[in-house]
Amino acid sequence: MPRRAMQVCPTPGCPELTTGGRCAACANKAARRRPSAAAKGYDARWERTRRAYLRTHPYCECDDCEALPPLLRPRATEVNHRDGLGPLGPRGHDWANLQAMTHAHHSRHTAREQPGGWNDREVHSS
């Protein structure tokens, strides 16, 4: 198998060479800064709420899919918080605040709604 060329760590200001991705020091530092899913409220209680909601709302409820007849809607795999605050928000487990979505539709929605997300540059560049 061919060896990969060394490249500079993509963390701004880090001169370390890596075979791909961040160097070990920068990767560890980034991992310590990011809170765990459980710390953000995505714990066993959320998993129970999510599972129950998807059981009663099995099809995607995004705006595009809502226009389709129920039998043509794709199966939902994720649950979105309409207020964007997640399970720790004041309505985190309130079913009126939840929306069943496919993974692709939830990712698209999140990229559009969350500031600083991966799609933020595209929105502000025009």
Image (spheres, rainbow, N blue to C red):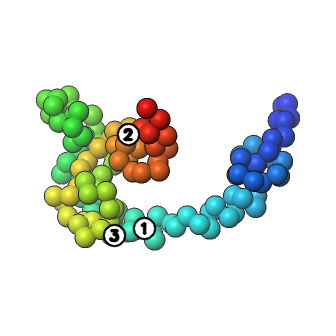
Q: Depth check: 32 or 8 in front?
A: 8
- Which residue does the image show at 81% across and 41% down from the upper left? 7
Q: Residues within 10 Å of mark 2 (few under 14, many from 20)?
A: few
Residue 108's disc is: 2
Q: What element carries label 1?
A: helix
Answer whether residue 99 is visible to the viewer in this image.
yes
The amino acid type found where label 3 is placed reads Leu
- On the image, the x and y values in percent for residue 44 come to 37, 68
Q: Under tag 3, what secondary structure? A: loop
Residue under numbered circle 1: 40
Q: Which residue is drawn at 25% across and 70% down?
A: 90
- Compare marks 2 and 1 and give the one earlier in the sequence: 1
**Which SS class for mark 2?**
helix
Instruction: State the mark number for residue 75.
Output: none
Q: How dense is the environment of label 1, judged by Cα within 10 Å: few (below 14), some, or many (20 and up)?
A: few
Relative side of 10 to 125, left or right? right
Within 10 Å of disc 3 (Cα), the crowding (few <14, some 14-19, many 20+) is: few
Q: Position of residue 61 (x, y in %)?
A: 21, 42
Q: What residue do we see at 64% from left, 61% from top?
A: 30
The three-letter code of the residue at mark 1 reads Lys
Question: Viewer-proximal residue, 45 or 40?
Answer: 40
Distance between the alpha carbons at the discs numbered 2 and 1: 21 Å
Which of the two labelled residues, at mark 1 and mark 3, occupies the earlier sequence position? 1
Amino acid tagged 2:
Arg
> Residue 88 got which mark?
3
